[in-house]
Each structure stands twice: as structure tokens, then as C-alpha cells.
Image: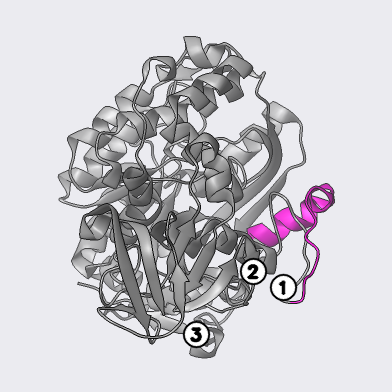
Amino acid sequence: MIIKNGIVYDPINGINGERMDLFIEGGRMVEEAKGEVIDASGLIVFPGGVDLHSHVAGSKVNLGRLMRPEDHRLDPVPRTEVTRGGVGYTVPTTYVTGYRYALLGYTTVMEAAMPPLTARHVHEELNDIPMVDKGAYTLMGNNHFVMKYLKEGNREKLRDFVAWLLRATKGYAIKLVNPGGVENWKWGRNVEDLDDQVENYGITPREIIRGLARVNEELGLPHSIHVHCNGLGNPGKFGLVVETVETAVAEGARIHITHIQFNSYGGEDWATLSSAAPEVAKAINRFKGVSCDLGQVIFGEATTMTADGPWQHKLFRLTGNKWYNSDVEVEEGAGIVPYTFRPKSPVNAVQWAIGLEVALLVEDPWKVVLTTDHPNAGPFYHYPKVIEWLMSREARERTLSEVHKAASSRSTLPSLDREYSLYEIAVITRAAPARLLGLRRKGHLGVGADADVAIYEFREDDIEGSFSRAKYVIKDGEIVVKDGKVVKEGWGRTWWVSPEGELPEDARRDFESYYTVSLENYPVEPEYLPRSEVIPCG
């Protein structure tokens, strides 16, 4: 295949809007090729999009679907000659999830929270999502064995257990959610800062962050620790983000702070909620090896779902909406609460402003990834709207004029005149997430890269519309979207890592004592990943 005369944006290779031809053969980008020609004259050409943080598979996603029959009526998707039908506005069915990502030009998505005990369920659903490559982050921040070995000060056993757990779950990265706080929630409590005690273990969230950050580097995992900070969603708790970053950096470790909008709140309570984005952005700017994704608020319906059980209970108490609480034995917890972000709500308006502020105040776009923490702050298919807000100050001012005035009076957003370029958009939606994940064949169009390409008809007067429906999407060298329609259903791979390390013998004994499943039935068998690839460590 040949893509001719496209205006190419490929930040990993330093290509900024150059008119050039691209060549594809055998599912990879190559120097020269013959075959079908796509005339991309006047069109912009990006690598396939990479979503570094989304919730698309697993038990909590299915529970979200079950809890919200009303969600099924909002945006039903009819079947076509090529595609299946489906439902779900905030929590779409598996096939609809894949189609919607493909229509946006995305070809890779990572499930952001996989409880080890339900990893098999996660992979079954990932296998059922067409059109994209995928992977999943293994939850560890409240795991019994992690906390046990930290309490004992046994770094070798901790390292071996983490390596074994990633292999057993076929996980891609170490995920921490409210470290220590979810364990305390099993006793009806939480942690308030990084030095609070975790019930029954005599350790602190700071020790959990420090220990797993160190292990991550020792194992040479491709992605940094992926952290949902303590104190999420609480006014005045933005300092915990700064402390969490400093804790990891002190260990010489990389760290990714996820959905940073939800952790960048100033004020003393909800009545005085204000943006602390400048302080948080300063910490991101100051340190190397630190990155974040936005968790940008989209006005309208959302379904909040997170392993942060105590926060979900607080949200239930704040809203009176439906609430589901889940406890995962020995490992984690979770909660689900439907939510509506309202433009005339002072709290929601400030939340909306904060995500954009962070993106505009972090100086290096390679440290930023565009997300909505789907479906927590809104569905992922509103990414084109976020792109428009980032690229156009006029679009931001238009929305500011429509939302509660608190967004203007309690944030710095009105004073920010920075506008992202197309090159920078390619960074935060393609190049940066691929590089942060260590996916060397993703996020660029150089020779040897996977032939994942998104082609758009870009119009400056309709940025959102330009990115809402790709003109062409090519996945592994085949056209899967044309003129904004799925024309071929394809299947991607699942990425996982396989670091060296065996389950410690005492963990085997504890497993038999504490779990309701046998150790032999715990790991995900290879047949659950019929289309997979191991990403090397080191």
C-alpha cells in the first residue's frame, strides 16, 4: 500500500506537517512498496491513536453495564453489513467499544485496572474487543503479599512476587489505586495522607509507592508505575500528588499520575473548591521521568468506576445515586456510581477547567496524555472535543461563557492563551503514550513500525468534527475505516510482560490459606490470549 501526498505528523521521527509518501508492506511501515494507492492530498496523516488509560474490560465494566439499563437507550448502534449492533453510551458493549475507537483513528487501548483474581475475565473481554491492540495494568497497591513483604522489608521476595503476578495475570504494568486506602476500606476506613498506617500491616502508603516504584525499575518494566493517588476527588488534597511524585523520584523511579484532574483540587471543601492545577503542573514540570494523563471532564452522563472503593462511597453519599461496592479478596476493592457532569454546577465547571489547565500549563507535551478516564469523566469518543479545546482558545472561551462562572473565577484557564498545534496533538494522543508505554512499534510511522495509520480531513473551523470521523484508518496494513465507516472488522493483539521471578514459597502457603481458589486455577492460561505478544523488559 502507498499513502501518497499526505501531510504527515510523526513526532517520534520529528516530522511536523511534511508532505510525503508512506509505504506499507506485511503489516509494517517500509521504505518502498507497491500496491493499492491512497491519495491523501490535502489530508493530514497521523499514526494510529494510543489510549494509555481507559476502562473497557473486566468485572467492574460489566457491573457498570448491569447497573445502568438507562445507559443502553442513550446511543444504540445498529448493525451493518460489516459490524455488529450494540448499546451503551458511557459503558458500551465490547464490539461497539472497538468500533468507536477505530472511527476516531485509535488502534491501541490499555485497560487501566485489572484485579489479579479476575484477570481471566478481563482478558476474555479484551479478546472480544475488535479493531485495536490492547493490554491491562495489574492492580497491586493493596495486595496482601505486596504489603506483607514491605512490612518484612524483604525486597527480594517483593520483586519476585510482582514479577510472578504480572506473568500470572498476563499484565502489562504495575497499577496502584489509593495505596493502603482500599485495604483500610475493608475495615470502613481510609488513609488521609501518605504516612497514615495501613490496618494490620504497620506500613504506610508512602512505603507502598516507594517499594513498588523501586521494583518497577529493578524489573525493567516498559511502563512506569501507574498511580491513582491517595486523596483523589477531595478538595485541598492536591499536595498528595506532589508528595507522591517526590516519593517516586527520590527512588530514581519513573511515575505516571493518572487522571490528574481528579487530584488537582484546592479549596477547603466543595463550597470553596478551586483549581490547584498550577501547583500540580509545577511538580510535573520540575522532574524528569514524571508524566500524567488528564481525566478531562466531559459535560453530560458518566459512569464512575474505580478500584478506589472509599472514594466511590463518598461520591454515593454526595449524590444519592446508585452505588455498588466490591471487595476482591486479599487484593483490592472497587465501586461504581453513575454521575452527571452539569455545566451550570460550580463544582463540575471547575473540574472541567482543571484538566485543560494542566494540559496547558505542563510545558512539555511529551509528559501529557489525553484521556477522560473513560467512563469516569465522560466517554472516550469525546476526545475530539477535548482536542478542539486544546487547539482553540476561542473554543475554550465559548465554553467558559456557557458554564458556571466559577470556572473563570476559581481557575487560571481564562488567562491561558496557549493553543496546541497539530504536532502537539499527535504527541499527546500518539507519540507520548506509545513512548511512555515502551511500545516501540506504536505511535510513529517510521520504518519497522506497525502499519497503524489514521488519515483525517482537517478543517480549522471544525476541529472537533475533523477528528470525530477519520477519512481512513489502517490497522496492520489493512483499511478498516473509510469515509467515517467501519469497512472491515479486524482483531488486534494483547500486550503483556514476562519479567523473571518465581512465587515465593511462603506465598504459596498463604495462598492456600486465604484464597477461595486454588493456586493452580489462579494464573491466566496462554489459551486465553490467542493473539498476544510479550513486550521485553529491561
Q: Is residue 443 visible?
A: yes
Helix, strand or loop at disc 3?
loop
Residue denoted by label 1: 83
101 relative position to 275: left or right: right
Residue denoted by label 3: 531
| Amino acid type at image mark 2 | Val
Q: Are marks 1 and 2 in contact (CB under 8 Å)?
A: yes
461 relative position to 484: left or right: left
Crowding near the residue tagged with mark 2, few <14, some 14–19, many ≥20 C-alpha atoms within 10 Å:
many
Q: Is residue 263 visible?
A: no
- List x then y, in percent, for residue 301: 71, 39
Q: Which mark is residue 486?
A: 2
| Amino acid type at image mark 1 | Thr
Distance between the Cα atoms at labels 1 and 2?
A: 7 Å
Vertical arrangement, residue 178 with respect to residue 170, above or below: above
Mark in front: 2 vs 3: 2
Name the quadrant containing residue 193. top left
Q: Magenta residues, as a range?
A: 60-81
Distance between the Cα atoms at labels 3 and 1?
A: 20 Å
